Amino acid sequence: FLSKRYVRKMDISIDSSTEYYNLMMKLKDMPYLEELCLRSSGIRSQFNITMPEDKTLDQVLNDTLSGLKIKILELKGFTMPWGDYSGKFGLSIISDSIEVLRLQYSKNFELSSIETEQLKEMQITSDYYYFCLYHAQSIEHGSFVYRKTDPPGRLARMLARGCPELDIYNGLDLNILRKESEDGDWLAVLGDHKGEGIDSDYSTCCHQCEYHSKETERRRERDERDETEDEEIESSDSSISISDSEPDDFGESDEENEEI
């Protein structure tokens, strides 16, 4: 099938074996290929004696995209980094031809870098936590992080640097944001669009927006409670001090008695 030069669209299930890696390299002999969907088979060479040589996901993807003039790329089911048991892993995408990118995020997978100068549209769907564009990839070490200033996540800054032509992110029109900005920088006004561009087909809630709001309120209530307790302590100390300094109502002070 890979010998058919006029194929325009392919959907392939791959694993970390050298055999599949070599098959991916043959895609470059298909000049009319425009749309490519890669699915992880879930099989890794560590668990299969017939695949002794392991390829990392980054290696397979980068070597496949290098020189491949596809316009649409979709990645599905990549929940493991192929060869690294450290848990969370990042993926790099570099292409000078991709115009549409669709990614299926898992608990352990996120973009670590992206350079796609022709990218127009990006769609991310997550099967774990859901985030708006502003907060995308804001989790650190598997946990939500609270910062009072509520800065943007790693993904928005990454896209602003590596995808200059990006127009649409999960339905959010970045051209509207460009018009709102004085210098055309959509990232500069993204903070006014928190909660938009959710990476889910089933939820309209950004977990980081929700966490930051609840944590801000919790800390405000705690600070108010601590302030009230401090005022009560100060009031109590003041009462004790006044009581100690008052003369005896039933007679003169010791100093006065001595003078008599």
Image: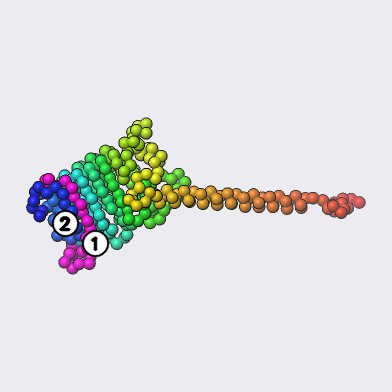
Residue 164 is inside the magenta segment:
no
Instruction: Estimate the x, y position of residue 47 in percent, counting from the top left.
Output: 22, 67
- Of all residues, the one furthest to the front in this rendering is 202
Category of crowding for the residue at label 2, using alpha-carbon neighbours closer than 10 angstroms: few (below 14), some (14–19), many (at least 20): many
Give left or right: position of 244 versus 10.
right
Q: How is the image coloured?
A: rainbow
Instruction: Estimate the x, y position of residue 197 in percent, counting from the top left.
Output: 34, 45
Tell me, for residue 21, which label it has, or none.
Answer: 2
**Residue underneath mark 1:** 42
Disc 2 is placed on an element classified as helix
Q: How many marks?
A: 2
Q: Residue at x 16, y 46 (%)?
A: 34
- Of all residues, the one furthest to the right in this rendering is 260
The magenta-colored residue range is: 30-53
Of residue 200 and residue 179, the one placed in the foreground of this image is 200
N-terminal label among 2 and 1: 2
Answer with the quarter of the image where residue 183 lies.
top left
> Mark 2 or mark 1: which is in front?
1
Q: Residue at x 37, y 33 (%)?
A: 180
Residue 260 visible to the viewer: yes
Helix, strand or loop for the magenta stretch, by majority: loop
Instruction: Estimate the x, y position of residue 142 in percent, counting from the top left.
Output: 38, 56
Q: Amino acid at mark 2?
A: Tyr
Q: Amino acid at mark 1?
A: Gly
Of residue 95 and residue 34, the one placed in the foreground of this image is 34
Residue 134 to residue 89: above or below? above
Disc 1 is placed on an element classified as loop
- Of all residues, the one furthest to the top in this rendering is 182
Q: Residue at x 19, y 58 (%)?
A: 14
Residue 106 to residue 67: above or below? below
Of residue 163 and residue 167, the one placed in the foreground of this image is 167
